């Protein structure tokens, strides 16, 4: 409320301490998973529980590389290919689309926007069976393509709605100036507008990636072979077979969080802007 | 036409599936008839059957109970945190940033995390409750009907808090500071300013947070599927998980499609409120 009013020193420290306490409580589960992944199976079941491993145990990670049964690095790579592909499709299609919607008037524009808005509300259950039949007919069932194409349908509407506002906020004069300098409409778009809208494009790429990375339903339904499945499906499968092997399970979970953590550390500002301008979660 | 490729993509991979899901729900498609070119017609049979199906009715009420309880709690906590972090102390921004983590983590991982926290023998929650003397015997959270629902609600609230917090935070920054200044000159106390200025001016934000929250919570799928798969004895089935079970575990594709369409219909009704609200803002 009082953003510019200075707080007294004591109050400042007090609020800082409270905020750290809130953070410790809310983020505890993440810490707990991480610590558990470093414990031995015995120590996990020990009472009272230890808040830092007595004996550092990296076997849960190492075991995944050695035995081929549930190689989490394989499924990590699968997830990465699927998510990167879905991101690429979403960005390549959404950037021109949002530009067209922001700049030109055409018939059915409102309806198209409404369509994108409604797609974001769709429950995955509506799409699963028809997509399943469709991918079988296209002969891409049980290939990464199926998950990639399906995951892109989450990224596209989100990206279009966000980027549309970005392009709309760029003054028209900029393009006109570029046109005078010898660009046509299209090269002005590629050379002038896209670079300006880069932060927006980044937001879209990050969110498309995160949506695809977190997807379970598509990856699990459209890809049957365990060694081709994404990491989320890998965890789910692993839980079914080794439900109480918590050291392995938590290690699996930590590896799944790595890209999310990296994105978070290096691109935090994009995330908050994406959440507030799009306000969407698939 | 810049928008055409994206539009066509969505038409093929989303528009067509919605349509064929509708068709599917009026047919009788099972494992045997899935790939036949001509499928038997069933009329409203599937819809009549599911409304006589006890599990369907309970998943409908479950979804409602789940959504409302998540919505209320995550909104209140998110609101309080937004007010707290809106104050100008040193850690406000970095800590608020870190609190976004739960929202970004793949839901499969979150589900695993809470399965671990709510575990009967291994779970830290039972340990804490026992050591402060609240319970004597370990509670079997995830294998007892009522408590399983509670556990899922808690996990989902954990995901939803950042979303509520960040949107309300942004809403708070749009309130002009002069209003607060003049209110304090007029002798209004903090409670009065909150109810007379903050709340009324936040109304559009609150509306969209609640409607969007409803939509995203109502279509919950991964979290429930990984944590309980609808069990024990169907007590945590949601519309989405039940639809999935009908289609991909029992291979009653048409019935699954009918359930998914009921889910979609409810979302669309709520969605129109959102669309109307955003129209007004523009």
Image (cartoon, grey):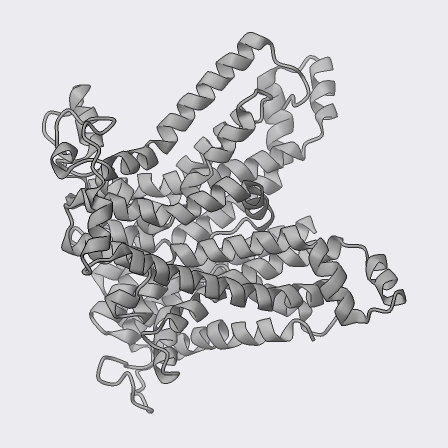
Going by the image, does B128 lie left or right of B46?
Answer: left
Q: Is residue B248 left or right of residue A93?
A: left
For image coordinates 40% across by 59% down, the residue present is: A80
Spot the residue most to the right. A180
Q: Is residue B90 above or below residue B116?
A: above
Task: For residue B85, say whether it is visible.
Answer: yes
Side (left or right) of A77 relative to B50: right
In front here: A42 or B204? Answer: A42
- A279 up-or-down from B157: above or below: below
Residue at the bottom extreme? B38
Instruction: Report the number of numbered marks.
Output: 0
What is the x, y in percent for residue A136?
A: 34, 81
Q: Position of residue B241 (x, y in %)?
A: 29, 59
Determine the residue positioned at 68% across, 32% down.
Answer: B175
Residue B268 position, x and y percent, is: 48, 61
Residue at 33% from the left image edge and 31% from the top image edge? A28
**Nearest the camera: B98 or B159?**
B98
**Left or right: A60 with respect to B23?**
left
In the figure, residue A132 lies in which quadrant? bottom left
Give the position of the C terminus of chain A as an image quadrant.
bottom left
Give the quarter of the figure containing the N terminus of chain A. top right
- Of B225 and A36, nearer the camera is A36
Q: Position of residue B119 (x, y in %)?
A: 18, 39
Visible residue check, residue A123: no
Decide: is A104 above or below B182.
below
State which quadrant residue B77 falls in. Answer: top left
């Amino acid at each position: 409320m009082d953003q510019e009013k200075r707080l007294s020193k004591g109050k400042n420290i007090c609020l800082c301490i409270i905020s750290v306490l809130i953070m410790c409580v809310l983020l505890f589960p993440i810490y707990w998973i991480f610590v558990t992944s470093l414990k031995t199976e015995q120590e996990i079941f020990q009472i009272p529980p230890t808040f830092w491993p007595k004996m550092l145990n990296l076997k849960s990670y190492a075991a995944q590389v050695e035995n081929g049964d549930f190689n989490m690095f394989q499924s990590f790579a699968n997830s990465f290919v699927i998510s990167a592909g879905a991101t690429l499709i979403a960005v390549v299609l959404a950037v021109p689309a949002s530009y067209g919607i922001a700049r030109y008037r055409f018939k059915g524009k409102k309806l198209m926007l409404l369509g994108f808005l409604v797609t974001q509300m769709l429950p995955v259950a509506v799409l699963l069976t028809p997509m399943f039949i469709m991918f079988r007919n296209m002969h891409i069932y049980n290939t990464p393509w199926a998950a990639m194409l399906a995951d892109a349908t989450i990224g596209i509407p989100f990206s279009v709605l966000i980027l549309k506002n970005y392009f709309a906020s760029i003054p028209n004069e900029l393009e006109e100036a570029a046109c005078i300098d010898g660009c046509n409409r299209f090269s002005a778009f590629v050379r002038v507008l896209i670079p300006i809208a880069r932060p927006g494009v980044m937001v879209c790429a990050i969110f498309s990636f995160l949506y695809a990375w977190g997807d379970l339903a598509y990856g699990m339904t459209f890809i049957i072979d365990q060694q081709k499945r994404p990491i989320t499906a890998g965890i789910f499968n692993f839980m079914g077979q080794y439900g109480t092997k918590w050291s392995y399970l938590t290690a699996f979970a930590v590896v799944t969080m790595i890209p999310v953590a990296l994105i978070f550390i290096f691109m935090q500002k994009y995330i908050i802007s994406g959440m507030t301008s799009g306000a969407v979660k698939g | 036409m810049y928008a055409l490729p994206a539009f066509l993509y969505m038409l093929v991979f989303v528009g067509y599936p919605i349509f064929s899901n509708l068709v599917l729900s009026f047919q009788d498609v099972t494992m045997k008839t899935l790939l036949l070119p001509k499928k038997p017609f069933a009329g409203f049979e599937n819809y009549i059957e599911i409304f006589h199906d006890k599990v369907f009715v309970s998943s409908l009420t479950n979804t409602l109970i789940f959504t409302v309880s998540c919505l209320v709690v995550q909104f209140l906590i998110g609101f309080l945190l937004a007010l707290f972090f809106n104050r100008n102390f040193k850690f406000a921004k970095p800590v608020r940033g870190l609190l976004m983590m739960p929202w970004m983590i793949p839901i499969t991982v979150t589900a695993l995390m809470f399965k671990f926290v709510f575990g009967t023998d291994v779970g830290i929650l039972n340990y804490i409750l026992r050591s402060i003397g609240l319970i004597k015997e370990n509670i079997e959270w995830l294998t007892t009907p009522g408590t399983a629902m509670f556990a899922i609600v808690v996990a989902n609230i954990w995901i939803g808090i950042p979303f509520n917090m960040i949107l309300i935070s942004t809403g708070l920054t749009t309130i002009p500071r002069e209003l607060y200044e003049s209110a304090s000159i007029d002798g209004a106390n903090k409670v009065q300013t909150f109810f007379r200025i903050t709340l009324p001016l936040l109304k559009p934000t609150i509306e969209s947070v609640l409607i969007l929250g409803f939509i995203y919570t109502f279509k919950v799928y991964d979290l429930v599927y990984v944590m309980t798969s609808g069990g024990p004895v169907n007590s945590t089935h949601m519309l989405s998980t039940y639809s999935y079970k009908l289609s991909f575990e029992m291979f009653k594709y048409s019935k699954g499609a009918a359930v998914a369409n009921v889910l979609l219909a409810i979302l669309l009704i709520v969605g129109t409120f959102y669309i109307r609200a955003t129209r007004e803002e523009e």
